[in-house]
Amino acid sequence: MKQLLPFSIYFISVFTAFSQAVDYEKLDSITSNISLMQQSANNFGFVENDKIYSLGFPEDNFHLYIHNLLATHAVYKTNNGKELLFLTEKIDITKANHIVYGNLTPDLLYIHLYFPDDLIKTKVFENGEIVDFLHLKYIEFYKSVENNISAVSNITALYGLLQKASGKITEEVLSQERKDWDQLTLAAYQEKYPNWIQIIEGKPKKVKAEVVASNPGNVENFMDFMYFKEYRLGLTEDEVKKTYPAFKRVYKTKNETDETFDYSIARKDNVYQGDLIGFYIKNNRTIGYYATIFGVFDRIVYTDESALAKVNEIKSDLIAKLGFEPTEKITETPTAGYISNTMTTYVWEKNDKMIALYYSKLVNAAGGDYFYFMISSIDQNLAR
């Protein structure tokens, strides 16, 4: 478990003369909620300045010092094995003016807590040494989409408690504000409290990586892609057919180049039955599976623009999951009934394990273009 630098994170429970105005139990509960919320984003990743980072959080990643009611926020960001600690101290939450939140990726949310200029100073550490100072206008919190702790609700509650503790509002005002928070619409709430912290829904960040899984690039998880993680590799042909009824009827073809056999599920009216459509066998062992995602066989018609947007979305998904960029190859494949079949293949390969995304544009002689997307995973180690 990561621990923050001792000189900046040890918490001091000092009860001062204003202790009667401070609800320590609520403050501790809220800051603990925010710390837990951020831990839900542990090992999630995103792209920043064209670099893929994974996130890490110590247990005490957000804490309020009781003796001065100033907060500390910490997050680790790792890129290519280089781990940096971003540490922001002496944060006066009562001076925050608005919150902007949105999707950093489909699975990861960001929450920016903004302050007036020159209030936020962040130190960047590498191996315990300060390597940079950042002067940002906000503190950036993170949470997974699936986590049910409300960042906005907890931050606004903390803001109100600290406003009361500093004598800026009364208990009656705070109590009414919390009732209004629960009962009013956001628009009505902000109209009633124009000088309170404001909440703005931000646009999704425009980043390359759309979805990020834990441990990007981890060899052990390399084949654990959503289409195939329930299907066992290393089985014989008979074992595959017995284990997975969908494969009882398959068409078998042989790749003369590498002696791999391709088994595809029987088709009816040129439509594949289900997403999972085939498996590969070499030396009598299943080394991989492949699937259509969507396209010509389910008769979905895309434009050049929408098809390109979709393949970029899928590619970004895989870049984020696997932690590195693919190689790219473009080929022309003669296909019966079509003027041309241009296939772009993106391949992620590590230690003879491979995941590939295939994107084909088929120009129909009868008019109209079709787009076909397929994905496969192969582990050549099983053929040895």
Image (spheres, rainbow, N blue to C red):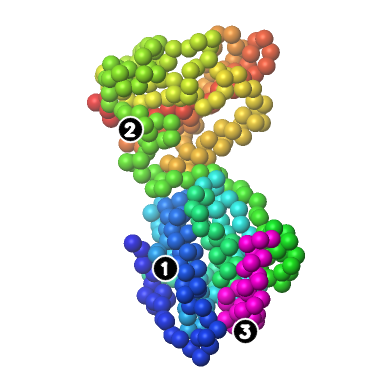
In this view, 118 is above or below 209: below
Give the magenta range.
Answer: 160-184
Numbered disc 1: secondary structure:
loop
Residue hosting label 1:
60
| Residue 123 seen in the current view | no
Q: Is residue 62 left or right of residue 351?
A: right
Q: Position of residue 82 (x, y in %)?
A: 40, 57
Q: Residue at image x 28%, y 26%? A: 234
- Estimate the spatial distance between the alpha carbons at disc 1 and disc 3, rounded to whole Å: 27 Å
Give amino acid for label 2. Answer: Asp
Q: Foreground: 72 or 21?
A: 21
| Residue 232 seen in the current view | yes
Numbered disc 3: secondary structure:
loop
Q: Is residue 361 left or right of residue 225?
A: right
- Estimate the spatial distance between the alpha carbons at disc 2 and disc 3, rounded to whole Å: 64 Å
Quadrant location of the C terminus in the rendered image: top left
Decide: few, some or many residues near mark 3? Use Cα within 10 Å; few <14, some 14-19, many ≥20: few
Query: Which residue lies most toward the right here?
Result: 191
Decide: few, some or many residues near mark 2? Use Cα within 10 Å; few <14, some 14-19, many ≥20: few
Q: Position of residue 165 (x, y in %)?
A: 57, 81
Residue hosting label 3:
167
Q: Are marks 2 and 3 in contact (CB under 8 Å)?
A: no
Numbered disc 2: secondary structure:
loop
Give amino acid for label 1. Answer: Asp
Marks 2 and 3, the one that precedes in the sequence: 3
Residue hosting label 2:
352
Q: Residue at image x 51%, y 83%? A: 68
Marks 1 and 3, the one that precedes in the sequence: 1
Q: Position of residue 358 (x, y in %)?
A: 50, 26
Give amino acid for label 3. Answer: Gly
- Estimate the spatial distance between the alpha carbons at disc 1 and disc 2, rounded to whole Å: 40 Å
In this view, 346 is above or below 260: below
